[in-house]
Structures are given as C-alpha cells and as structure tokens.
C-alpha cells in the first residue's frame, strides 16, 4: 500500500529546527516531497539528512524572510514551485524570527521594521505567491499557528504582529471559502520545547512540554486522516 502523501508536494518554512523541522520530517515520512526553507543552511541540511535517512525527498530553499531584499525572491517561490512540480498540496508556515520582549514605548525603529518584515510582510508575500497554486491543487492545506501567548506587558512585539497575522489569515480563509477546496488551518499549538519557547520562557519546566515531534504528528494527522 502506498504512503498517505505519496506524490504530494509540501512547502515548509521554519524547517531548520523545532516544529517546522518536525513537520517536514513527518510529511516526508508520509511520502510528501518537502521543500524546506529557513535562514540556516546547516539546519536545513540537518533536516535533509533526517529525511534522506529513511529515503524521503526534500528540496532546500535557504531564505531570510527578515531581509528586505528577499521580497523579489519570495514573489518567485510560487511560480518556481509551479514550474517544477505543477502543484502545491501543503503549505506550513512555521518560521518566526525571535524578537526581544520590550515595553511598547521602547521598541526601536530597527527592531520594529525587522519584526514587520520577517514576521508579517513576508507572510503576506508568501500567501500572495502561493495562493494561485494552492487554490489550483485539489484539497490543498495551508497551516498557520495562533499566537504563542496573549496580550500582556512587554509582549507587544510578538502579540501585535501575531494578532495582525491572524487577522490576515482569517480574512484570506473567508475570501477563498466559496471559491476553492483549499483548507486553511489556523491552529492553537500546545506548549512545545523549542528554541523559540526557551527564549521566551527560559524558566519553564521543559519536561511538561510537548516535543516538536509530538506536536508535528498532531498537525500532520489533520492532513493524513
Ligand atoms: N513552541 C511553542 O510552544 C509554540 C506555541 C504556539 C505557537 N508556536 C508557533 O510555532 C511556530 C514555530 O515556532 P518554534 O517554536 O518551532 O520555533 P523555533 O524552533 O525557534 O523555529 C523557528 C524557525 O523559524 C526560522 N526563522 C527564524 N527567523 C527566520 C527568518 N528571518 N527567515 C526565515 N526563517 C526564519 C528558524 O530557522 P533559522 O534560524 O535557520 O532561520 C526556525 O526554523 C512559531 O510561529 C511560533 O509562534 C510555537
């Protein structure tokens, strides 16, 4: 019997570690060809090594979503995947660039601009470039994650951006609902032991957290069942 995602194409951002890496590995184990993206070439190669170890297939796309020069490169991702694979079954956006927690009045121009570029504008560009292919592929899935925490002092660099992103995702969800079989998932995740989590909550008991593999398996089950 074939694998559940045999012949499917998946694009995963934030695939060099954490939840994105675990999702890419789980998707490849289920038979998908994974296009994996992040800034760190070494991290992507590590993900690729894991995927190759069980005979899976991956294409590496090193990309810094926080680099203002990356806009043109992001805009070309959709047409490039279309030219090479002519389909996109799964998009998982797991990239998030760490931002230091700061009182609203003390956020610097540079930190604000970088945050908007890496964590909001780039996602709008990704949605815009991938949407034609996702909506043209039968029963495709796009997966995004809800904010890691709620409104509280010092968290505006994270919560403001993630809330704006959520509004954009849910708007897109409503816009395409009647027009396409694309499923847009906007998921709450359980606390998961990753570098991002450790940076935001250094004193947390890690033994009580999900592993990235546990979280990824639950995410991928949405697609495979
Ligand atoms: N962990 C949790 O408990 C939890 C809970 C709720 C929601 N989430 C959400 O889950 C998502 C994944 O988080 P995680 O916990 O897995 O974090 P993580 O382990 O730190 O992974 C973040 C990923 O984003 C990539 N990245 C960071 N900046 C980037 C940039 N400028 N351009 C391209 N890629 C970039 C990183 O790779 P490079 O450094 O190689 O670029 C890495 O692969 C985030 O949206 C987070 O808010 C996590």
Image (cartoon, rainbow, N blue to C red):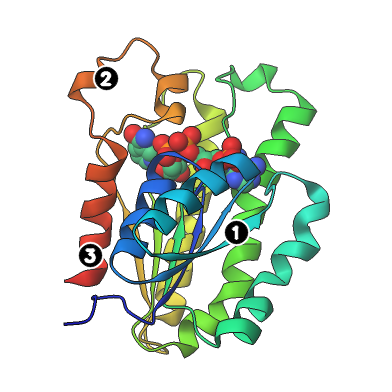
Q: On the rendered structure, is 39 left or right of 174?
A: right
Marks 1 and 2, how far apart at CA: 30 Å
Q: Residue 60 — which label? A: 1
Q: Is residue 86 above or below residue 31?
A: below
Q: Nearer the viewer, mark 1 or mark 2?
A: 1
Depth check, front residue: 76 or 37: 37
Mark 1 surroundings: few (<14), some (14-19) or many (≥20) residues within 10 A: some
6 versus 94 height, above or below: below
Pointer 2: what residue?
Answer: 206
Q: Earlier in the sequence, mark 1 or mark 2?
A: 1
**Image spot of residue 145 (x, y percent):** 39, 50
Residues under labels 3 and 1: Cα distance? 24 Å
The residue carrying mark 3 has its beta carbon less than 8 Å from ligand 1: no
Q: Is residue 115 left or right of residue 68?
A: left
- The answer to whether mark 3 and mark 1 are in CB contact below 8 A is no
Q: Residue at x 40, y 74 (%)?
A: 174
Q: Nearer the viewer, residue 127 or 177?
A: 127
Q: Secondary structure at mark 2?
A: helix
Q: Position of residue 124 (x, y in %)?
A: 61, 61
In the picture provided, is 41 more to the left or to the right than 17? Answer: right
Q: Quadrant of residue 195?
A: top left
Dividing the picture into quadrants, the one containing residue 92 is bottom left
Classify mark 3: helix, strand or loop: helix
Which residue is under mark 3? 222
* Nearer-N-terminus badge (3/2): 2
């Amino acid at each position: 019997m074939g694998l559940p995602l045999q012949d499917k194409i998946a694009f995963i951002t934030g695939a060099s570690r954490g939840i994105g890496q675990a999702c890419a590995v789980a998707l490849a184990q289920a038979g998908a060809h994974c296009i994996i993206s992040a800034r760190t070439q070494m991290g992507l190669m590590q993900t690729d090594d894991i995927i190759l170890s069980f005979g899976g297939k991956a294409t590496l796309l090193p990309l810094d979503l926080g680099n203002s020069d990356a806009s043109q490169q992001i805009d070309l991702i959709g047409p490039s995947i279309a030219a090479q694979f002519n389909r996109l079954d799964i998009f998982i956006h797991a990239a998030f660039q760490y931002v230091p927690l700061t009182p609203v009045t003390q956020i610097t121009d540079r930190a604000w601009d970088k945050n908007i570029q890496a964590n909001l504008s780039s996602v709008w560009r990704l949605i815009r470039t991938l949407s034609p292919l996702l909506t043209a592929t039968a029963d495709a899935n796009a997966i995004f994650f809800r904010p890691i925490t709620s409104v509280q002092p010092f968290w505006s660099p994270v919560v403001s951006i993630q809330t704006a992103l959520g509004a954009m995702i849910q708007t897109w969800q409503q816009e395409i609902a009647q027009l396409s079989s694309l499923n847009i998932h906007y998921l709450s995740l359980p606390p998961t032991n990753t570098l991002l989590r450790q940076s935001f909550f250094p004193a947390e008991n890690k033994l009580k957290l999900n592993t990235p593999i546990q979280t990824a398996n639950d995410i991928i089950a949405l697609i495979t069942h």
